[in-house]
Image (cartoon, grey):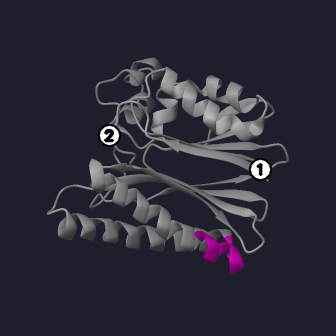
Amino acid sequence: MRYSALSDIGLKREKNEDNWNIVLDNSGQPVGFIIADGMGGHLAGEEASRIAVEEMSSIILECVSTGATEESIQDRISEKIFAINDRIMDYSNHKLGGLKSGTTLSIGVVYQEHLHIAHIGDCRVYRIRNNTIEKLTQDHSYVAELVKGGLISSDEAHNHPDRNRITRALGFRDNFYPDFYTTPILEGDVYVFCTDGLYSEISDEEIRNEVLKEPRETVADRLVEAAKKRGGNDNITVIVAWM
């Protein structure tokens, strides 16, 4: 497996609130991909996303090293999600004087020839197979619900004034539970994990086109630069993994 990853502050933000990690097993092989987009401004969002990535890294390694089943992977991740949510809320209450702090989170666990995904918020996981890109996760956002309900089009969602309104995230009192997805990994698959700083600036097809170019090692850099050329209005984080 090969991968390329990069996180960039973008052109408009004062601080990078994104965090990410690639979890390696004892042999140095990637077994997990994590991406988190903090919310709350300055230290609030940065710390929330750091907590989520740190805690998730340990549970992913635990799952793959102890021979977990698909069901137990979801159970362990769910338990950890509750613990992370409590930790973020405790941080907000005791370190930020009640200031809201939160983060979105998408993870992928490579285990038994499947990618096990847990997803909260509006980071995305894409799969490119047979030169076709497909979004595997559903955004937890206000505009995504409007699109799903047929109230606005995808084009209208892209410029909607509430496009940054998240409906599910860690640090929320209630709406923080993840969606789970499991997909078989086929030889030649490419998986893209990214924050909205990437896909809000460039289209899915543009992401696909960059990923399919050579050299593979610089694809994360090329994607970030493409987003910055379109405005770079948010932090930009991307992980690309070839199976």
Q: Residues within 10 Å of mark 1 (few under 14, many from 20)?
A: few
What is the three-letter code of the residue carrying label 1? Arg
Horizontal and vertical percent position of residue 103: 37, 53
Picture quadrant where residue 94 is located: bottom left
Disc 2 marks which residue?
Answer: 14
Horizontal and vertical percent position of residue 48: 36, 59
Q: Residue at x 39, y 29 (%)?
A: 233
Please determine whether, in this image, residue 214 is positioned above or below residue 9: above
Mark sitting earlier along the chain (2/1): 1
Query: Is 98 contained in the magenta span?
Result: no
Please determine whether, in this image, residue 141 is positioned above or below residue 46: above
* Front position in the image: 39 or 215: 215
Q: Residue at x 48, y 20 (%)?
A: 230
Disc 1 marks which residue?
Answer: 2
Label 2 close to label 1 by CB (< 8 Å): no
* Front position in the image: 22 or 123: 22
Asked if one can make out residue 194 in the rendered structure from this viewpoint, the answer is no
Horizontal and vertical percent position of residue 14: 32, 40
Horizontal and vertical percent position of residue 225: 56, 28
Picture quadrant where residue 29 is located: bottom right
Q: Residues within 10 Å of mark 2 (few under 14, many from 20)?
A: few
* Front position in the image: 77 or 38: 38
The stretch in magenta equals 60-69
Asked if one can make out residue 58 in the rendered structure from this viewpoint, the answer is yes
What is the three-letter code of the residue carrying label 2? Glu
Dot 1 falls on a residue whose secondary structure is strand
